[in-house]
Image (cartoon, rainbow, N blue to C red):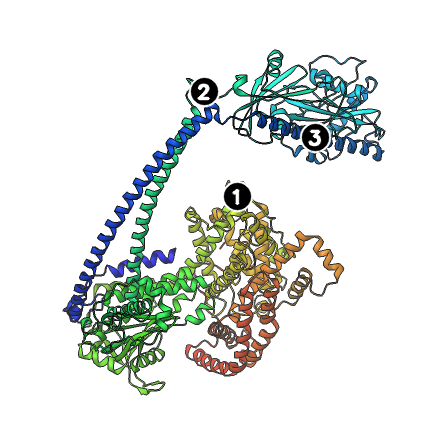
Amino acid sequence: KMSTRFSDNYFRKVESAPAADPNADDDLSIVASDDENSSSAGPEDARTTSSSTAKNAAADLVRRETKAVSYLRYFILIILLICAIGMTIGFYNLATAAENGECLASDQVMDMFALALEKNLRQLRMDRLGKAFTLSSAFSSYVLESGVAEGGFPMQWPYVTIPHYDVRTVAALASDDVLEVNMAPLVEPSEQSQFDNYAVLQQQPDCTFSGCQVVPGIYNKDGSVIRSSDATSPIWQISPFDITDPGDRLANQFSDPVQGSALAEMTQNNAAVWSGFDYSGTGGGNGSPDVILFYPIYQDFKQVDIAGSVSLRMNLLNHLEYAIPFSLPTEMNILVQACGQAASFSLVDNQLTYLGAVDEQSMNTFKSLAEAAIIEFPALYQYGEFEDGTGGGNGCPYEIVIVPSTVTGFVANAPDDGTSQKAVVLTSLAAVAFFVIIVSFLIYDWLVERRQAVVMNLATKSTAIVENLFPAQVRDRMLQDIEAEKKKSKGKGDVDPGVGDAAATPVVPATGNSSPSATATAPNKVSVKQFLTDQPDHGNDLSSQPIADLFPNTTVFFADIAGFTAWSSQREPHQVFTLLETLYRSFDVIAKKLKVFKVETIGDCYMAVTGLPNPDESHAVHMARFAYQCLMGMKELIRELEAILGPGTSDLALRVGMHSGSVTAGVLRGEKSRFQLFGDTVNTASRMESTSERGRIQVSQETADLLMAAGKSHWLKPREELVVAKGKGELKTYWLDPTKKRRHTKTHKDIRVAQEIAVNNPNAGPGEAPFDDKYARLIDWNVDVLLHHLARVISCRSRSPSRGSLVNHSSEVALLPAAINDVAEVVALPPFDADSSKFRRARPDVSMLQQTRADLHEYVKRIALMYRDVPFHNFEHASHVTMSATKLLNRIVTPENVDYDRETHDIASDLHDYTYGITSDPLTQFAVVFSALVHDVDHTGVPNGQLAKENPEMAELYRNKSIAEQNSVDLAWDLLIDPRYNELQRCIAGDEEESKRFRQLVVNSVLATDIFDKDMKELRNKRWDKAFHRGLSSSQRELNETNMEEDRNMKATIVIEHIIQASDVAHTMQHWHIYTKWNERLFEEMYSAFDCGRAEKNPAEFWYKGELWFFDNYVIPLAKKLEECNVFGVASDECLNYATANRNEWQAKGEEIVSQMVARYQKKFFVAGLAKKRAPSRRDIIKPKSKSRDNEL
């Protein structure tokens, strides 16, 4: 987004540039003067006239087609209206007839409905009895088989609590009509006191929170006192049960009239009992009464002695809905009677509605009606009588009466005045349906017209694209050939000679001075879409004349990005395309302004030409302007892009070559037709580019002659040496130097720029850029990277949304131990948090972190100043390590072998496991990037052994272990905990735990870069073998896998250390040019130390073999470990491939490279007089860390 924003500003600036002054010879603005473009006016006028005629013909065609479509639209609307009126009248007549009784259900249908309902209800009741029987048997079995006392009470009824009661009752509660399943023991009068104590004891373990209520004992629901001679049946276990609301727990069921009557029947008859209507429950939320099925629980399997009961509370309406067999064409009433109570329900289209209670007299009246169908069910069911449903006893038998609602009078929507409401509703629905159809047709018609407009717009844009790819004459002739071929195929060869043979007519080659009308007839109407879709067939048909022309006066431009291949090896693919798209888009804008024709781009090479398709006498001048503007534009853009694409971007430069002459231009037909240039001019222009230098424009003698003839000789500077071009021999060439003016007069702009350079860098030479310009861009880039990760830390923090309390670091400087003491074998990362996982892959919003950005920028700037000005271990190298670490982290965060076509929660959980929790912790990712930035702070350019000799007090302070690395950690940490960065500290770590984990991660990461400490290396290797099971026995591997969390954290710790290690030597696993660049800087640093007497050995003596040893024993094994981690995807293969290739190339060329470096730096140090001096420091405002570690920075 940032790239698009600043590049758009640049493009607007280019497009809005004022026209050049025709009288100014040295004007190099992107807009050519009027006199230089006047030569192309004639052909443009001819093309405009032809285009106007074509547009008029197209407009007539559009008007005719639009008129025909309008007539068709009106006709369809009339047909739809007629159908709507006829169908609406028909619906009304049919519905009225049905309401008058012509379609009422017959007696036979009523009888079938009653029989089916009776069958379904019988099966439903048997199913509920079966579930109650299963629970009763399970409870009895548990007591008989357990035999273990609980809390001093014997394992016998009534002192029984069924374990996992909610699980055991799941099957019964799976039915929608079952609201509650209760277990109630029978408690004799002599057992009541002891049972109360047992109940209180059993409730206490679950009642540990505030507000929880322990029911003290059995109580009557009506509030009466339990008599000493009364047996009770307290509800002991309830499912579902809410511990915060005990409900009817320990309520005596005998005290409820409905439940007590049913229980008495159950104990008296030793049988399952259906109760009467119970209105004390919730009724399932529909107002309908509940019915309760009581089933006895026996002391043993003899089924004689009853120990308690299991009851299923069911909603009557839901119970009946289960049994409805099919819908009836008219509304029915279903009346249910039990124990002198009756309830009425309305049945409409398989939907039951509770109407209310019905008195017994009305119920008897309805039962006597001729239209009534009656179903009877018994109230008691003895054991073994489930199949036939017979029963006995004196309980409440159920009677169900089915009567049409027109007879009972219970009609929700009764007709009035004989008017058919149903007929009106159906007729209205039919009218609405046809209205929707008509409206849908109109919307569809509007969408079709809108689509046609979109298609036309796309066709116009496609035509514009084709015009950019092909000149107008070439495009018209290609469309002619396609149209002729289509007609020939349609007529199977029988085509009008006047048209079909047009493609076979020889085409006169066009010269540079020919006009479009001389080579092309009036074009036939062929859409660009047809051409593109039919392109393979027409492109492979070589029977027609090729489309090609000779253009004698052109200038060809080639431009290549120097250093692009090496630069791209360090970047993500999207960063590579961001650079190319931004640069090429700027070139395209300039080309459009200057009438330059872009031919194509091949990789990082840009090709353009002037002088075609329209002749241009000033083609060389226009191309010179274009080349200069591209060169200057790229310099401006890459400086801005470095803040986005990372360090090294500003080192890219454009290498340009130009040559003038004749070219053959045309369409190379085939699978993908393309406009191409051929000829010696193209080859020579390519040689001019390949032999040019970065940041310069090389032109041939032919182009130089044209510029001289145009009065631009002051733009040219002869190249000192002759250029040897492949196939051309030695050539004399010129540098195009647009800054060389004919009149050397300083402008106000020149004076102002010189003043700015002098103020910013007083020691800079003439024309030299300010010293800190590059470092300022690196600082901005590092701030953006860190802020991106820090924003994720803030948004994904799983703690409270508040900013958190400030961690007090005021005494840490004095109290913190040596950094090596904070090295953790395993850093515990936080567990997976599903609630915040959705934020982790979202783009963080950094717009609200302006103060944090300012603090972070100040911090990074001070870190940059704390780096010494040594050739290798400097701030630029730290930025390179940061960029490499960011690239590896991105490969971890977006692995390729994870299925992303699933729920977000599942993806996030898999990513957490796959990456050992690294993706789930933004703080870890921030710590890795932070460590990469600070890992070499205050590095003096000598190894730890030499540093211990030069500073024994520091060596003693750090116990001769990783001295430079610990010093870097301390300096960066001391600066971070400075009170001025309180806001930044709060953003990084919200509490002590996060602060501790952040420090552990930083210490582990920075100290991991000390690869020559044998003890630390051995410890890391052992952890690797333990975590990834290398060399472990099967029992040890099983033990590791048992503690999965610790194993995951250990793997995460090792992966983090390997990220920083690989990033620290990333130049060895990147393009050869990147490797040689940093390898030479490291050599210079070590050679400088030797030359100053700070190193015992001359690096030139061991550098060649030392690099081979380093590749074989560290770099390549490290790359292989990245692959074994199984979290880096293709990045591990890329690292290993580059490392192997660099090792082989170094083996072949290393000795020669070392010799050249030795000669170069011996001369440099001698001339500079650095034989006895140490490397200078840029830390002007930062004091070195004192020996006592107590001074502030």
Q: Amino acid at mark 2?
A: Pro
Q: Which residue is mark 1?
A: 806
**Number of residues whose C-alpha sits closer than 10 Å to that of mark 3, classed few (under 14), some (14–19) or many (20 or more):** some
Give the label, 3 or 1, closer to the camera. 3
**Is 685 above or below relative to 282?**
below
Residue in the picture at 41% in, 58% down: 780
Whole-percent x, y for residue 374 in the image:
64, 21
Dot 1 falls on a residue whose secondary structure is loop
Q: Which mark is residue 128?
A: 3
Numbered circles on residues, count: 3
State whether residue 1158 appears in this view: yes
Looking at the image, residue 819 sits to the left or right of residue 393; the answer is: left
Q: State the residue lying farthest toward the top.
A: 361
Dot 2 falls on a residue whose secondary structure is loop
Q: Amino acid at mark 3?
A: Arg
Give the label, 3 or 2, closer to the camera. 2
Quadrant (top left/top right/bottom left/bottom right) for the N terminus: bottom left
Whole-percent x, y for residue 91 in the image:
41, 31
Q: Which residue is mark 2?
A: 415
**Is 500 above or below relative to 1156?**
above
